[in-house]
Image (cartoon, rainbow, N blue to C red):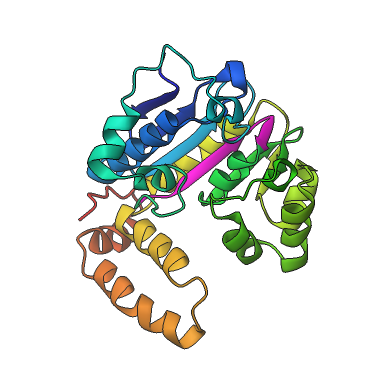
Amino acid sequence: MPDVVVEKQGHVLTVTLNRPQRRNAMTLAMFARLSDAWDLADGDDEIRVIVLTGADGHFSAGMDLRAMSGDIDPTDDYDVAGRMEREGSGFIYDGLLKTRHPMVPVVAAVEGTAIAGGTELLQGTDIRIAGESAVFGVSEVRWALYPMGGSAVRLPRQISFTEAADLLLTGRHVSAAEARGMGLIGQVVPDGTALARAYETAATIAENGPLAVQAVLRTLRGTSGMTEEAAFEFEEPVGRAVFKSWDATEGPAAFAEKRPPVYRGR
């Protein structure tokens, strides 16, 4: 089975990190496959939301340091060298959700380990749900490495500066409860139920107007760091485009007729 499993069911695309023998620690091939999954989502109008999770009770232990040292899985036949020769290394950061984001929301379902690159990948998601025993942290400095997945820039924008500095400079790990208190994750649920809750959330999102959802997400992400005045300028054409859509007629009509709306994404 591939180390990234991609499954489509209705309007939901599930992306599962699948190297359980190494707590889903990531390799260059996995970054490539993640990048391909985001491309798939953006190229399929039926997909309205992505659920990102890990296999066998763990999210991800980050970059596989043993693989970096040459201990590579011999069964992986992905041509990483060929892709780098053709495209360069941009797919690595794309896969990590550092340099790109799918047009649809990404809901993360976290159990067990989510440290180093696991926490970095998490920061590129939109809604984050974790089992109560999940563990988080950006531990690169402990191994004399730099968190190239974007945490030194992104983390202090998502949680407080001092809490980000604490995590980044000590490399310590935190519980789901502490991560929730920081705002790194949004929900803590009983162990083993994060994926089910993520699917519930995804189903709710998928029922909404897809163009409206994508426009709100674009504004949420695109205005981060802007002044309020600049952000309002950004959102004006985004919002107006939604009101010109067919779906924006269907939604109020369905409300008036007391029936479920049938959105077409146009």
Q: Quadrant of residue 173?
A: top right
Q: Vertically, is 241 above or below 137? A: below
Instruction: Report the number of discs.
Output: 0
Main SS class of the magenta portion in the image? strand
Left or right for 264, reference 109: left
Q: Residue at x 62, y 59 (%)?
A: 152
Q: Residue at x 60, y 36 (%)?
A: 62
Q: Quadrant of the C terminus?
A: bottom left
Q: Quadrant of residue 12?
A: top left
Left or right for 91, reference 174: left
Q: Residue 33: image x %, image y %?
A: 37, 32
Is residue 78 visible to us here?
A: yes
Q: Does the magenta segment cover residue 100? A: no
Is residue 11 visible to us here?
A: no
Q: Vertically, is 177 above or below 78? A: below
Q: Which residues are magenta?
A: 104-114
Q: Residue 63: image x %, image y %?
A: 57, 35
Q: Does the magenta segment cover residue 108? A: yes
Q: Residue at x 51, y 51 (%)?
A: 124
Q: Residue 45 or 159: which is nearer the viewer?
A: 159
Q: Residue 170: image x %, image y %?
A: 80, 51
Q: Residue at x 41, y 24 (%)?
A: 5
Q: Residue 264 or 89: which is nearer the viewer?
A: 89
Q: Quadrant of the N terminus?
A: top left
Q: Quadrant of residue 31?
A: top left
Q: Residue 118 or 55: which is nearer the viewer?
A: 118
Left or right for 20, reference 222: right
Q: Residue 258: image x %, image y %?
A: 36, 53
Q: Residue 10 or 82: which is nearer the viewer?
A: 82
Question: Which residue occupies the extreme bottom position in the image?
Answer: 229
